[in-house]
Image (cartoon, helix red, strand yellow):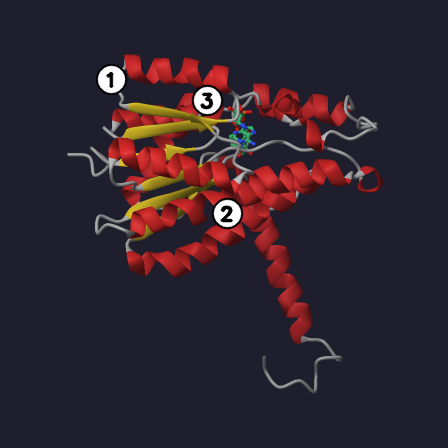
Amino acid sequence: MSKFKGKTAIISGGAEGIGLSIAKALGEQGMNIVLTDINQQNLENAAKELEESGVPVLTARLDVADEEQWKHIAEKASERFGKLHMVVNNAGVGGDSVSVENQEKKGWQWTLDVNLMGVVYGAKTIVPFIKSHDEGGWIVNVASMAGMGGFLHGGAYNATKAAVVALSESWYEELSSQNINVSVLCPAFVKTRIYDSERNRPEQYKSEISSPESNNSFLKKTKKMIENGIEVSIVGKRVVEALNNGEFYIFTHPGYRSEIQDRFKAIDEAFKDSEKSIALKEVPNQ
Ligand SMILES: NC(=O)c1ccc[n+]([C@@H]2O[C@H](COP(=O)([O-])OP(=O)(O)OC[C@H]3O[C@@H](n4cnc5c(N)ncnc54)[C@H](O)[C@@H]3O)[C@@H](O)[C@H]2O)c1
């Protein structure tokens, strides 16, 4: 029997894309799904699809950047399903893809609030519910290959995804001994609508000056890469497989291995340089 059967998962940004794919895959394992998203209409459509395949679903509109909303939904989820076992911190936005001098505060704030603080609030809210019983649980944070190494014009997106990888490593250290498994999903390109995150940007994060590079060729290139990405349905299945295996870093694009190795190699070389440093000669071995 699946170890997920009868347990409950809360998924953010679950109305479409990777979040919905994970919801479907966990639903197939017999989990109760608390499906949340900022987009109410898409949420209802997605919930209908899940319910039609026999998955018990509770839907709730949730802007992950609002900690109070998280608390409210956790209460509703526990009233409906009892114990909570898993949080999938998936909601994310692409942010602004601009050069250094065109970074804008509101765009940064939006990306930080959703991609980083959304993950913090999700874990902060749900972990006490997981700890309140003795069945253990899971935190699944959705980062990105962008969290493994910066890419051109990635800006706030890169920064938040690297932060989510670092946070996940820290939470893994903290929570493993308490029977809470932490994983971080790092996909490269997946066929979703992430390139059009602008549709989800609330009014308060819109700049007076619209991004001067909003239609640049870089964005067009990114859109094309995403459209040529892997099918989103694969990602949910891969997550279930990895959780069953107890994988911490969950990769979906093995072809990126050599790129990450190059980064590690460069870091290792930099350590070697520091060993030869004259400036550090007098410092005892640190
Ligand atoms: N698609 C890719 O190539 C790719 C690659 C690496 C990582 N990711 C990550 O996967 C996650 C899911 O993205 P996706 O590709 O499915 O994109 P998507 O745009 O298809 O889905 C994102 C979902 O999040 C919701 N959302 C946006 N802002 C929200 C908010 N403030 N609160 C709650 N929900 C909100 C949207 O309504 C949407 O349903 C993101 O964290 C993204 O960074 C995607």
**Residue 58: x %, y % from top left:** 34, 25
* Dot placed on the residue nearer the N-terminal end, 2 or 1: 1
Q: Is mark 3 within 8 Å of ligand 1?
A: yes
Which quadrant of the figure contains the C terminus?
bottom right
Residue beneath label 1, please?
54
Q: Nearer the viewer, residue 76 or 178?
A: 76
* Dot placed on the residue nearer the N-terminal end, 2 or 3: 3
Determine the secondary structure under disc 1. Answer: loop
Question: How far apart are the alpha carbons under marks 1 and 3?
Answer: 17 Å
Left or right: 17 with respect to 29? right
Residue beneath label 3, please?
15
Q: Quadrant of residue 45?
A: top left
Residue 259 in sight: no
* Dot placed on the residue nearer the N-terminal end, 1 or 3: 3
Query: Tags 2 and 3 in contact by the CB under 8 Å rule?
Result: no
Determine the secondary structure under disc 3. Answer: loop
Q: Residues within 10 Å of mark 2 (few under 14, many from 20)?
A: some
Q: Residues within 10 Å of mark 3 (few under 14, many from 20)?
A: many
Left or right: 269 with respect to 135? right
Residue beneath label 2, please?
120
